[in-house]
Image: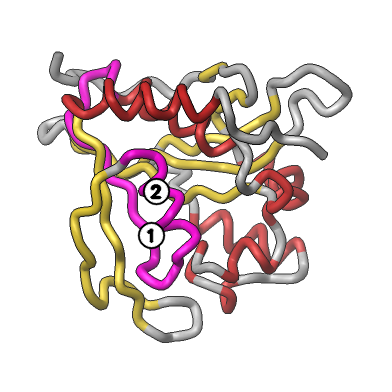
Amino acid sequence: MSPSAPLPHVPLVGRLVTVAPLTLDDLPELHRAIGRPEVFAGGWGGGAAAYRADYDGWAEFMRGYLLWDSGLVYGVRRTTPGPDAGELLGTTTVGQVDLRCESAHLGWTAYAPEVWGTGVNVETKLLVLGSLFDHGLGRVQIQADGANERSRAAILRLGATFEGVQRRTQPRADGSWRDTAVYSVLADEWPGVRDGLMRRLETVQQPSR
């Protein structure tokens, strides 16, 4: 099946998280989740120098950084029942969608540090990748700053294939130049990747406060 129309930007509901469209009105809540220096320290957003301690500066940065006009910007919310159900835990974006080439880039992903190492990222990727391949994409790229070992290891654990490092691809916020580690999942690989993610969900730590 080849994609023939813009990809749908709709809620994707899982057992742990719901991945739903994010709007600029959600920025105050997103700030509580990821407006932390440790989120930027590994390279997200251009690295530690991009962090803004005050909300107004952070919100201005986020309005320019996420692909509000050209991508599918999602918020990742807690599905699990309880008083924290619906809590915003982070964000992820589908960008650089090329329907002719049946490809897209899944990235711009950040979560509250409290849910790092839990099932949040596993189920988020399961839901979003599943939606993209169900709608006819043949290749989804995932990438990270070459110096961000934590993110690179997480991408490999998802089951993506390492394609190589593109050198000097873009400036970081501190003016240094980033090398980009590129990974991908292809449509014919997706059933195996999907099964691996589902097995991980059976054993990974559940998100908690």
Residue 127 visible to an observer of this rendering:
no
- Rendering quarter of residue 15: top right
184 up-or-down from 170: above or below? above
Q: What's the coloring here?
A: secondary structure
Asked if the residues shown at circle 2 and circle 1 are in contact, with their CB atoms under 8 angstroms apart, the answer is: yes
Q: Residue 36: x percent and y percent?
A: 71, 62
* Residue hosting label 2: 155
156 up-or-down from 178: above or below? above
Q: In terms of secondary structure, where does tag 2 sit?
A: helix
At 32% from the left and 29% from the top, the residue drawn is 193
Three-letter code for the amino acid on which mark 1 is drawn: Ala
At 22% from the left and 74% from the top, the residue drawn is 167
State how far apart marks 2 and 1 are (Cα): 9 Å
- Rendering quarter of residue 8: top left
Q: Which segment did they paint magenta?
A: 133-159
Three-letter code for the amino acid on which mark 2 is drawn: Ile
At 37% from the left and 42% from the top, the residue drawn is 106
Q: Residue furthest bottom?
A: 175
* Residue hosting label 1: 144
